Amino acid sequence: MVAGSLANESIGYSANMPFWSHDATTVPAKTFELGSAGIMVGKPDPMMMPGFPAQTTFTPYLSLRNTTAKPLNVSFRLNYALTMGGTPIDRQLPAQLLLPFESRIVEFEPMLRAAGLRSFDGMINLSASFTGHGGDLLLANGSVDQTGTYVFPVRPQVIGEGIGRISGYWSVADGNDAMFTLWNPTDQPQDIIATLYYGDGSGTYHLPMHLAPQASTTLDVGMLIMEKTPDRDGKVIPAGIREGSASFDTSGHDSAAADGKKKINLVLAGGVFNVAEATCGEICQYCNGYNNFILLPGPIDLTVGGSGTVVTHATDSYGSDQTFSGGSWTTTNSAVMTVNNGSVGGVNVGQVTLQNFLSNVDVYQGEFCVSDNMNDSCPEGNPNSSGGGNVFGITGVSPLPLVIGTTGLLTISGSGLSGKGTPTLNFDGAGISAVNPSVVNDNTIQAGYAVSCSAGPQSITVSFPSFDNVSTNAFPLSVALPAAPAATIQLAGQNISGTQSVVVGQQIALSASVSLPSCMTFSSQSWSIPPGTAVGGYVNAAGNGPPDTTGGQVAALPPTSTSDPLPLGYTFYWVSPGNSLNMSYQYTMSGGFGSVNSPVATAAFNVAGPTSVSVSVPPLGQWEINQTNSGFALYFGLGISPDIGIQFNGRATSPSGYTDTYWWVQLIGSDSSTYTAGSSTLNCTAGTGLDNTIPYATGLSTADSPSLGLPSADSKVTRSDSFTMYFMWRPGLTSDIPVPLGYVAWQIYGDAVQSGGTWTVQSDSTASANAFQASASYPTWTSTVTNGGTKTCH
Amino acid sequence: MRYLVYYVACAITLTFFSPLAAPGPKQFFSLTVAAPKEPIKAGTELRLLVTVTNTSDRDISFITSPGLIPEDGARYEIDVRDMQGSSAPPSAYLRTKDNRIPTEYGSNIARTLGPGESFVDKVTVTRFYDLSQPGKYTIWVALPTPPRQNLGEGKVKSNSITVTVIQ
């Protein structure tokens, strides 16, 4: 900081020494116009400035200095009015060409005379213009009386726009008076509001002022007080107010300006003088401007889809809040929040920073005296105001999907969830409820939840009743049916895993064990068809018991599927051995809004059975006539070893660990007998079907020696039959069934003739047996032939 | 070659054979009839279980019908008498059967019993006798000695049992 002044204490002369900071930047040169307002010329106005000695005459002075190393051409313009409030007059004065670093005192009198102001009394305004940089020209001017007693320096100031000036201390106490001179250096009228601030803080005084183009006016504080001039509000300055400060601000409006204020371009000079004491002093001025630019509300909270307005605020030089419009607005993430000239819209949940860049706004840069520093103009800036933007809402919910019939802890993720009081969870569909919601932090809300069987997809919102009942965005909740648990396959009521070892004929009573989730019931179930050879059972004619004399039949495999809601069992019997035979089970459960298929449960089986199976038939026996208690009979072998008609010797290796229970079952495929007496022959049959009973016999061997009674009255009797002897094995387990291993088909024909009471076997009598045929086919029948049973004859 | 077969045809022949029911010189096996524990209703079947036991010290083979417990009443002599000692009347089956056609017919197998071993036969008495009249009946059965085993001829008689028929 540098300051300086001139003084001549012997004659009471003093004057400020102006300093101007030199713009040393390389910015392009521009034209500067420096204005000095209220330079007194001639005799002072006795009304405005009473007390000067008679004959006091003021003469302007002007000093210039070129601070550059180049010549500097300075143009001058004189502005004045012949009468107070008269038409402003502009005149160009001769230019001054300053040599490098030259200092020059310009004689003002000749220029005034040249301008026709030889006998002018009043105030003039002077502007000096040059092209260069700030500080290239130092200029000092003012007025001094002919005695050098009264010096009224007027500090030039750059003519430029601003929203106003703040004037420093004024005083009307102790013979002082304060006077402000305002010059409108433009060709546009300007409206100004002058505000006087009372020194004791008791009030303000607002005086509207209109300045025509190039016009000037003077505000004498002492006269305002003395004449009790009312301000715009009808108030007058209390008589006790002797000091204070003042400001001169625009009162015009400009809708295009960010702050709505029409800028003014004013040359202002002020001073406190005391004629009696022959003192005067300049009143320092400060630029009005703004600082503390912010966006309000900050941060702004929006919902998704919501909208709002953000306004730029700043504090002016008086400490008052000022709002701004316009500017260039930006958002750090338009996918979260959009902004358009302060209007914001919530797009997605998240946070952004909003900014508004203002252009050419008067900014407050601290207190500095315009005159002292001879600044270029009131400083302008492009302030950037910023603030936060929150789009609060839900970004996620866990768990998802929600499963019907379940309860648990619901975690809602989002942004801006805290600071709004206790939340309320709202569902726009039925079936989902929440309890005890609480805010964990700004990003998390948790609550207990329950999903009923009837719940479906819907949306959730979170509202805050104690915070204007604001509500978040609706977040979709997917609802799912529970997963179908895998069933456990059971064999005979016992859970099984891995490969099961079973045997043919063993009852394979499968069932599936599964605990269905809440809300779900069986809608269908299915078993796979047993691989290999399997039957549903081996039963009697009625199908309600084991095969017997009423009949023998193979029961079909049970249905593999059902829509019955009860668990489906599946019972069958393997007939043939095999390994890695898989049975699988699957179900579909339904409930809520649909159905779900279960995983396929599979059980593997190794099915054992007799191996190395064979049946051998030794050489057949002979037809013979044997005496019985009632006479004679035709026998195919007697039946007692070694006289046996047909012998069956079975061989097989039973599965390890099972009793060797082998069965023989014989079916009669055809039967006929003839009884001839003289020329009469009866053709009879005992029928076909099961031979007596099941089993025919047990063990690894059996035999048959069929017989036929020979009536004493007959001369010839024949018998013709075909048989099939089945070899079977039964594992000896509970609820088992015999399984066929194979069969031997055999046939007989016997022929006996009586002659003279003696029966003889005829040579055409035969018997034969086929080779053993391994087979998994069951013997079946619908009738039984019993020994001694009734014959049908014709 | 002809062999004697002890094949009981019908109850009528039982009367004929009854004088032969006396045991032979040596009894190689025994017959035991289990009595019903309760009275039977008239018109229902009376089915007796006859246990044949080898009481000798050698194997004996018997000709029987197929089956684990075969229905072999036709192989037995059956004696049924009322309280007055009269033979019960023959069954409708016997009364109406065509005597032109012999009943001897069917498959035959041998059961061989070792010493002390037994098997059981079923004998359906009501197939041969009419027990429709309420009262008490005394019943015994007899089985001819099996042939071709050097067991001699004759038959073995069972114990007698009393069966009550009620209305």
Image (cartoon, helix red, strand yellow):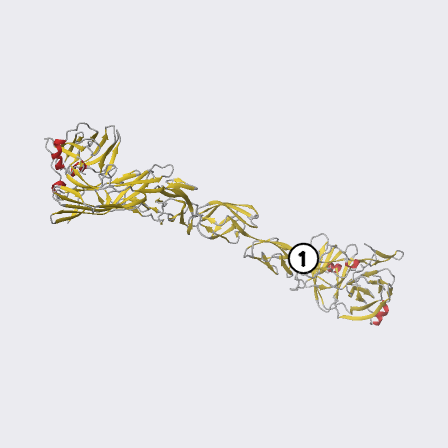
Residue A240 relative to residue A553: left or right: right
Residue A104 relative to residue A622: left or right: right
Query: Chain letter of disc 1?
Result: A
Q: Nearer the viewer, residue A193 or B139?
A: B139
Hey, what amino acid is under mark 1? Asn
Task: Kindly tell me whether residue A403 is visible in this rendering.
Answer: yes
Task: Kindly tell me whether residue B135 is visible in this rendering.
Answer: no
Q: How many marks?
A: 1
Question: Residue at label 1?
Answer: A384
Residue A694 image-quadrant placement: top left
Q: Nearer the viewer, residue B15 or A81?
A: B15
Q: Nearer the viewer, residue A154 or A616?
A: A616
Looking at the image, the residue that sits furthest to the right is: A10
Residue B7 at x, y = what percent? Answer: 17, 37
Q: Secondary structure at mark 1?
A: strand
Q: Is residue A773 above or below residue A31?
A: above
Residue A751 at x, y = what percent? Answer: 18, 45
Residue A393 relative to residue A430: left or right: right
Q: Nearer the viewer, residue A318 or A20?
A: A20
Residue A243 image-quadrant placement: bottom right
Residue A166 image-quadrant placement: bottom right
Residue B65 at x, y = what percent? Answer: 22, 39
* Quarter of the image where the N terminus of chain A is located: bottom right
Q: Residue at x 25, y 28 (%)?
A: B57
Residue A202 relative to residue A400: left or right: right
Residue A316 at x, y = what percent? Answer: 69, 56
Q: Residues within 10 Å of mark 1 (few under 14, many from 20)?
A: some
